[in-house]
Image (cartoon, helix red, strand yellow):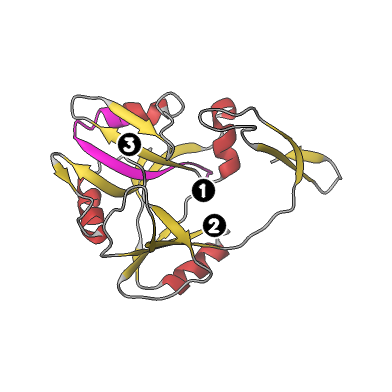
Amino acid sequence: MIKPMLAKLAEAPFDNPNWIFEIKWDGYRTIAEVEKKGKVRLYSRNGLSFNEQFSSVAEELATWKEDAILDGEMVVVDEHGKSHFQLMQNYQTTKEGNLVYYIFDLIRYKDQDLRKVPLMDRKKLLKEILPASKQIRFSDHIIGEGVKFFKEAQKNELEGIVAKDSESPYRAGKRSNEWLKIKTQMRQEAVITGFTEPKGGRKYFGALVLGVYDKDGKLIYI
């Protein structure tokens, strides 16, 4: 099992020709271990299996017939291609939106460990080998223009962006200054109405159940 590389929080966007900038997807961080014989393992950053929860993605990866370890974000997008965490949380019951696995890094390919290879080289290879698919997509980036990209993220009401040093290795399980997350700071006041049971390695409770009041004063689940 590979633990994903993690980003530190930065306060403001910046420009740097040696850095790339990606969309910060609003979903579940997912590692995919794919074998050319058709075996696929999808799991969370804490090692919890996603194979059953995202079976359609696992089935599509199984047809790829390659040996690879991928890092990305499992999201549910609306008709405009925007990811929504609420859609993701409710997807198993509502099936609203489109489930997409956005892949932004390649940790291993065939018999080669790529963790020491510079990020831009890893992404270039990833883009070349990924099959065309509606559910499995390459998470693209821009180079250098972080401030402009951040403003576009704000304009489109995205969660934020991720800045990455283009020469950075893949530091599995580490939170590094070579990857930075910059949030658009959109906030929503919410009412805590309850909590779910703990699962996996969690203790005490699983997740908070939140609601907001609509324009008619009715409390609705978010």
Task: Farthest residue to the front: give it.
Answer: 203
Front tag of 1 and 3: 3
Badges 2 and 3: C-beta atoms under 8 Å apart? no
Between the C-alphas of marks 2 and 1, the distance is 8 Å
Taking 18 as reference, is 54 above or below it? above
User: Which region shows up in magenta?
Assistant: 60-79
Crowdedness of circle 3 by 10 Å Cα count: few (<14), some, many (20+)?
A: many
Read off the residue under disc 1: 26
62 displayed left or right of 212 = left
What's the mark number on residue 32?
3
Q: Amino acid at mark 1?
A: Asp
Read off the residue under disc 2: 158
Between the C-alphas of marks 1 and 3, the distance is 18 Å
Q: Is residue 111 magenta?
A: no
Task: From the viewer's side, name the closer residue of 127 and 178.
Answer: 178
Residue 212: x and y, percent?
Answer: 76, 45
